[in-house]
Image: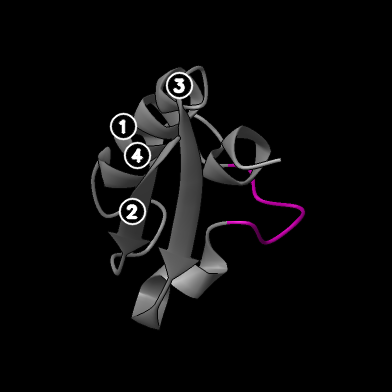
Amino acid sequence: MKTLTIILTDGPYISEYAEMAAKVAKAALKQHHVNIFLYLDAVHIPKAGQSPSIFNNAGEMFR
């Protein structure tokens, strides 16, 4: 089985970057191992208690 590694560096609500990565990772799990590395501002993505007004809750997507 192949491995997909995704590296996120932007914060959770800078763009739809985190949401798209979560969707790609979820789809890839059907046939791949998936690694997700959170670096720099991306370490705030899984933080509990977020309530964004524009984007979907990125923290919920990565649970």
Above or below for 14 versus 41: above
Distance from disc 3 to disc 1, alpha carbons, whole Å, reads 18 Å
First reached walking from the N terminus: tag 4 or tag 3:
4
Q: Residues within 10 Å of mark 4 (few under 14, many from 20)?
A: some
Q: How many marks?
A: 4
Residue at image mark 2: 6
Residue 55 figure quarter: top left
How far is mark 4 from mark 1, CA to CA?
4 Å
Circle 3 crowding by C-alpha within 10 Å: few under 14, some 14–19, many from 20: few
Seen at 65% across and 50% down, the residue is 50
Q: Secondary structure at mark 3?
A: loop
Name the residue beneath numbered marker 4: 21
Q: Are marks 3 and 1 in contact (CB under 8 Å)?
A: no
Q: Earlier in the sequence, mark 1 or mark 2?
A: 2
Q: CA distance from mark 1 to mark 2?
A: 11 Å
The quadrant in which the N terminus is found is: top left
Mark 2 touches mark 4? (CB < 8 Å): yes
Upstream in sequence: badge 3 or badge 1: 1
- Circles 1 and 2, Cβ within 8 Å, touching? The answer is no
Residue 9 visible in rendering: yes
Q: Inspect the image, locate mark 3, and give the three-letter code of the amino acid beneath it.
A: Gln
Label 3: which residue?
A: 31
Circle 2 crowding by C-alpha within 10 Å: few under 14, some 14–19, many from 20: some
Q: Amino acid at mark 1?
A: Met
Residue 53: where, in percent of width, then height? 48, 35
Residue underneath mark 1: 20
Residue 38 placed where, x, y %? 45, 69
